[in-house]
Image: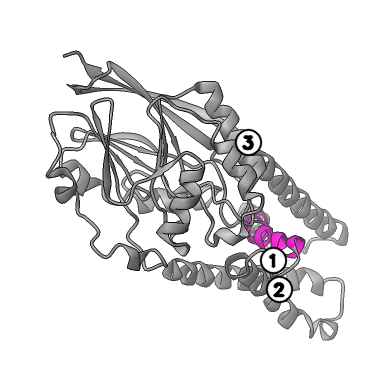
Amino acid sequence: MNAFILRLALVAFIGNLYLGFRIGHWFGKFYNKVKLWWFVPVYLLIPFAMFYLMFYVQRGSVSPSIKLLGNYWMGIYIYLIIFVFIIDLCLLIRLLIKRRKSPPLSFRQLIAAGISVVVFVAGFMVYGTLHARTIIVNRYEIAISKSADVEQISVALISDIHLGNLVGLNQINKIVNRLNEIKPDLVLWAGDIFDNNMDAVEKQNEIISVLRTVQPKYGSYAVFGNHDSWNSVYEVKTFLNAAGITLLVDEVAEIGGIYLIGRHYRTSGRSAGENNSLKTMDKLTAEIDMNRPVFVLEHRPNSINEIKNEKADVLFCGHTHAGQYFPANIATMLEYPLYYGHKKFDNTHVFVTSGAGVWGVPIRIGTDSEIMLVRVGFDRK
């Protein structure tokens, strides 16, 4: 996570210079440049103060509205850069078409350009916020050439809720309502249930009560994600047990003649010291009957080769958020062999969900908050 934040900070700094240059240029059209001596330090201070609020300040240490502003700022900042760049690109195209330097924009044109950018960015933030709060169900069907105690099973895959500063009881209610509508046989929570420190989660007892209303035939199971690792295994397991969810820490559960392997997140967080003997896939599969269907639940989709080499039938993952918002989804697409959706690697089906919550900027643009519902069919005995 630290490396990711450093890379993000570097990109933000470069973007900040470009945006600052353009804003300063526009201001210079209206004010004497001597009066802009304050612009550079103030402009540089604001985005990095917001960056610090977004990543390092937990709820309770500052006003909730200030914390929320810090989270929204990154989205505002990204789309400001995009729309300012589009305007610059249009000006460049105009220059290339006319093949001579065009007269500078008039005062009215500059005002119109500035208002257009503000309106578009505000519109994207409003749309992204509302869209992120809408839970949809995406359905898949696969068949496995192995027999179980059942002919088929419906599996709901949920990930990356990030309970804490941005997500709380309201989103849990929406997720649970959808789960109770589709009535899956098995519910899998693929990590990042919490957004770092559990203490930031408000109304925990109410959230637990709502989660307990989900009663799938074969139960609910969860694994750790990278953000969950800010808490101890004991803390997370206690919360989940109260909510009727079983936490698998490199453990195997048997469900209707199906083996479910829950892989613990490899982390340097608080939970790392509690499980120093993390098991590899070959150890986890050594004592099970591989002639039976084998499901694997893991947070990140970066162990696909290891899992397919061990002949697991289905891998369920989250973590990527499918990028969560444009243009982050493009970078995410390039980072993982499967960043979202379903793909078969040899004989192993891999599912990666975009998640049902948000992290960082509380918006979704170009992605959905979802529950994956996978219907798995088996051979008859």
Figure check: 79 above or below 339? below
Out of 71 and 238, give the one closest to the viewer. Answer: 238
Q: Residues within 10 Å of mark 2 (few under 14, many from 20)?
A: few
Looking at the image, is mark 2 or mark 3 nearer the viewer?
3
Figure check: 209 above or below 236? above
Mark drawn on residue 173: 3
Image spot of residue 296 (x, y percent): 28, 40
Residue range corresponding to the magenta coloring: 64-86
Image spot of residue 171 (x, y percent): 63, 41
Measure how far apart labels 2 and 3 are at the Cα level: 35 Å
Q: Label 3 near label 2: C-beta < 8 Å?
A: no
Measure how far apart labels 2 and 1 are at the Cα level: 21 Å
Element assignment for label 1: loop
Three-letter amino acid code at the position of disc 1: Gly
Q: On the rendered structure, is 309 left or right of 301?
A: left
- Please give the residue where the numbered disc 1 appears in the rendered image: 60
Out of 361 and 208, give the one closest to the viewer. Answer: 208
Three-letter amino acid code at the position of disc 2: Ile
Three-letter amino acid code at the position of disc 3: Asn
Is 33 in the magenta?
no
> Which residue does the image show at 39% across and 63% down from the upper left?
271
> Which residue does the image show at 21% across and 55% down from the upper left?
279
